[in-house]
Amino acid sequence: MCSAIAQAEPGGVLVHCGGGRDRTGLIVLVLLALVGVATADIAADHALSHLRRAELCARAGRGEDTPAIERIIADNGTTAHDLIGDIVGSHDMAAYLRSGGLPETGLIALRDRLLD
């Protein structure tokens, strides 16, 4: 995914999944952390995805799963904000992407694209 973003033609790049929150959220978390966005800002961005997910579910006439997810997180004695902080604080995102096969040139291209 990240190499595709790094190598994409000029312009916007759409990253999405079925609900636009979980898989997409993880990719966006990695990308934002890679370029040094503050953890609080990453958590706030992710929180917005819950609102958009609720709107999507309401339009589709489906139940929304955010309350269940929040209960599971709370039952484990933490919050989504703290989980995001733990992930960002305990991982070197550049090393993580390298371990997935993204070469240094890809990291440079990805950073350049995100910060352009």
Image (spheres, helix red, strand yellow):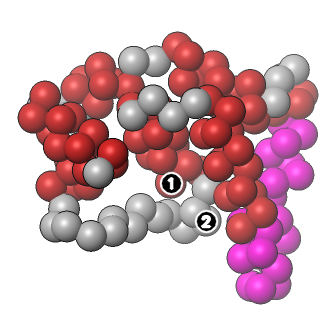
* Residue indicated by mark 1: 24
Q: Is the magenta stretch mostly helix, strand or loop?
A: helix
Disc 2 crowd, CA 10 A, few/some/many (<14, 14-19, 20+): some
Give residue 59's position: percent from left, percent from top. 77, 85
Q: Which residue is drawn at 72% across and 76% down?
A: 56
Q: Is residue 62 above or below residue 86?
A: below
In percent of width and height, residue 102 lies at 18, 35
Q: Residue 19 carries which label?
A: 2
Query: Residue extending furthest top?
Result: 90
Q: Is residue 49 left or right of residue 67?
A: left
Mark on residue 56? none
Q: How far apart are marks 1 and 2 (CA)?
A: 8 Å
The residue located at (45%, 29%) in the rendering is 36
Q: Which amino acid does label 1 sit on?
A: Thr
What range is drawn magenta here? 53-72
Which of disc 2 and disc 1 is earlier in sequence?
2
- Residue placed most toward the observer, 64 or 80: 80
Q: Local crowd at mark 1 within 10 Å, few (<14), some, or many (≥20)? A: some
- Which residue is at 81% across, 54% downward? 66
Q: Is residue 113 visible in this depiction of the protein?
A: yes
Secondary structure category for the residue under label 1: helix
Q: In this view, does 34 lie to the left or right of 113?
A: right
Q: Do the residues labelled 1 and 2 touch (CB within 8 Å)?
A: yes
Whether the magenta-drawn stretch holds residue 18 is answered as no
In the rendered structure, does residue 67 fall within the stretch colored magenta? yes
